[in-house]
């Protein structure tokens, strides 16, 4: 995902659990009591107290907790044994020093993180992010979201996340290699194909995964292909992994539109970012007959009335490592580069934020509503602020949360683990078919769960409750651990 549109992240709405996002308790179920909501409010306050100065984690926890009252009223056993308190506390938090040497011989020191959040459903699974903004709170928020996202896939994986405040931009290949080797020299003792399986994220692509895997193999003297996912297809990776997150989000929003009696072909779509997720989002949109109008980076955004030329964009971003303004310069008259303002000011039918967390705020949401948007689906992790999501709810805009909509990446990672365990390699067509099935199943699960708990069409409530139920049931079955 492209690290663009930086905004100050705020926990937001710091009072009690928001009453505006209450799902209605279904008929035949005891009415949600005020004490249940008070309990959730107290739990949220405790999360904030125990995790100070971590606004991203506070935001993620609140977004889940404020939707759980109906399921706790219907299934009170899920609130026993401090289960929610345990859900909000990682099983393990790793913070370590990463010393490395730059090309001038100067020793640098970064911090490494790995949050092993929950393994009730399977080994910890989640990416590594290398970016200067990475800190404990961000990694914790990502791991918390990953726990529920992975549960929705039904593929037997727990939740985790990791990374470092190392910035690979502007570093030579040798510097990146030395950093990755130092990072893995500490991390290797905590991971394994049945324990914790990292993957890539912002700043960690196939190059970094290769260096990390090589160091793991060097230290352990084992070819353990399943210890990392996102590997090259020629050495244990899966076909279709690179495009899975972007493709999956497009498949998810197509299902959302179908539920509204519309089809994706012919829709005008805004995409933010220009990294891996955005590139493959654009590619899949065109494949399915929609038109992607925009991409962006930290310098601004491009609007192309004829639709983004994916081949030109890949040449500039992947091969040349250029900026989106270079796309506008070479595309010609149909493309305009806009250095100021927001990509969300462009009128369109669908918006797919695919850059970074909290990139789309309430003002952006109102601009999208004025521009006629019908559906918004998160390609990045939590790119829509809580107040923006509320704007969409009030306007009747279908909203797909990231824990459901961008689960395609981790789904194909789990399929890569399955291939590794059997020393097998699947065709791209088989992987794409499996991805389509997983995304359709996730959509239907969220839709049905929301309807069951009195919030028809509310994908946030559906995703949170469905993911929570799967993790909670496994935790209860396994006892107090």
Image (spheres, rainbow, N blue to C red):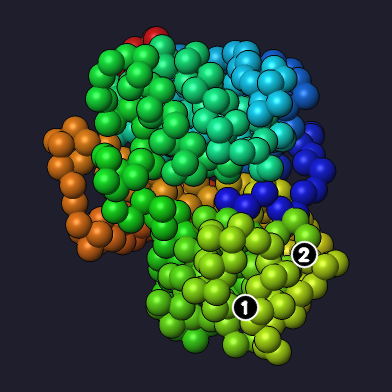
Which class describes the residues within 10 Å of circle 1: few (<14), some (14-19), or many (20+)? many
Residue 236 vertical position relative to residue 247 in the rendered view, above or below: above
Which class describes the residues within 10 Å of circle 2: few (<14), some (14-19), or many (20+)? many
Going by the image, does 18 lie left or right of 382? right
Give x and y (percent) for residue 330.
Answer: 66, 79
Going by the image, does 99 lie left or right of 259? right
Mark 1 highlights which residue?
293
Mark 2 highlights which residue?
300
Q: Is residue 41 visible?
A: no
Give x and y (percent) for residue 58.
Answer: 69, 31
Q: Quadrant of residue 289?
A: bottom left
Give x and y (percent) for residue 145.
Answer: 53, 37
- Secondary-structure class at tag 1: loop
Give x and y (percent) for residue 179.
Answer: 57, 26
Going by the image, does 213 lie left or right of 458? left
Q: Residue sitting at 55 percent across and 38 percent down?
A: 173
Which of the two residues, 188 or 265, is positioned nearer the viewer here? 188
Q: Is residue 315 visible?
A: yes
Which of the two residues, 124 or 372, is positioned nearer the viewer here? 124
- Secondary-structure class at tag 2: strand
Q: Quadrant of the C terminus?
A: top left
Q: Residue sitting at 73 percent across and 69 percent down?
A: 325
Q: Check if mark 2's residue and mark 1's residue have beta carbons within 8 Å.
A: no
Q: Residue sitting at 49 percent across and 80 percent down?
A: 290
Q: How far is disc 2 from disc 1 in space, using C-alphas?
A: 14 Å
């Amino acid at each position: 995902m492209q690290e663009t549109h930086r905004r100050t992240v705020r926990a937001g709405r710091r009072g009690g659990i928001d009453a505006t996002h209450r799902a209605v308790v279904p008929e035949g179920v005891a009415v949600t009591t005020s004490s249940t909501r008070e309990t959730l409010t107290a739990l949220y306050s405790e999360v904030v107290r125990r995790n100070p100065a971590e606004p991203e984690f506070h935001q993620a926890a609140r977004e889940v907790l404020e939707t759980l009252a109906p399921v706790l009223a219907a299934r009170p056993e899920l609130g026993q044994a401090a289960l929610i308190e345990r859900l909000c506390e990682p099983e393990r938090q790793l913070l370590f020093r990463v010393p490395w040497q730059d090309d001038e011989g100067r020793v640098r020191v970064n911090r490494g993180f790995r949050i092993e959040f929950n393994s009730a459903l399977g080994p910890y699974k989640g990416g590594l992010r290398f970016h200067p903004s990475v800190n404990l709170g961000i990694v914790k928020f990502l791991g918390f979201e990953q726990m529920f996202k992975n549960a929705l896939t039904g593929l037997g994986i727990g939740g985790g996340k990791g990374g470092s405040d190392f910035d690979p931009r502007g570093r030579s290949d040798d510097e990146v290699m030395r950093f990755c080797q130092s990072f893995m020299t500490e991390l290797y003792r905590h991971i394994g194909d049945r324990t914790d399986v990292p993957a890539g994220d912002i700043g960690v692509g196939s190059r970094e995964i290769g260096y990390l895997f090589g160091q793991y193999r060097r230290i352990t003297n084992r070819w353990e292909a399943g210890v990392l996912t996102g590997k090259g297809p020629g050495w244990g990776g899966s076909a279709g992994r690179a495009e899975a997150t972007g493709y999956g989000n497009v498949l998810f929003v197509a299902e959302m539109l179908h539920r509204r009696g519309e089809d994706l072909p012919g829709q005008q779509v805004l995409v933010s970012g220009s990294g891996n997720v955005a590139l493959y989002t654009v590619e899949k949109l065109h494949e399915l007959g929609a038109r992607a109008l925009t991409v962006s980076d930290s310098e601004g955004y491009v609007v192309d009335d004829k639709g983004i030329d994916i081949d030109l964009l890949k040449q500039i971003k992947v091969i040349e490592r250029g900026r989106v303004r270079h796309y506008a310069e070479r595309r010609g008259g149909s493309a305009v580069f806009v250095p100021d303002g927001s990509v969300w000011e462009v009128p369109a039918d669908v918006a797919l934020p695919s850059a970074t967390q909290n990139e789309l705020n309430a003002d952006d949401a109102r601009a999208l509503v004025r521009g006629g948007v019908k559906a918004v689906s998160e390609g990045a992790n939590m790119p829509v602020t809580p107040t923006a999501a509320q704007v969409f709810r009030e306007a009747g805009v279908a909203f797909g949360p990231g824990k459901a909509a961008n689960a395609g990446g981790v789904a194909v990672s789990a399929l890569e683990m399955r291939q590794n365990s059997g020393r097998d390699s699947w065709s791209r067509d088989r992987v794409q078919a499996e991805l389509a099935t997983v995304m359709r199943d996730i959509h239907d699960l969220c839709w049905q769960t929301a309807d069951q708990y009195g919030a028809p069409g509310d994908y946030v409530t559906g995703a949170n409750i469905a993911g929570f139920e799967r993790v909670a049931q496994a935790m209860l079955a396994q006892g107090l651990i």
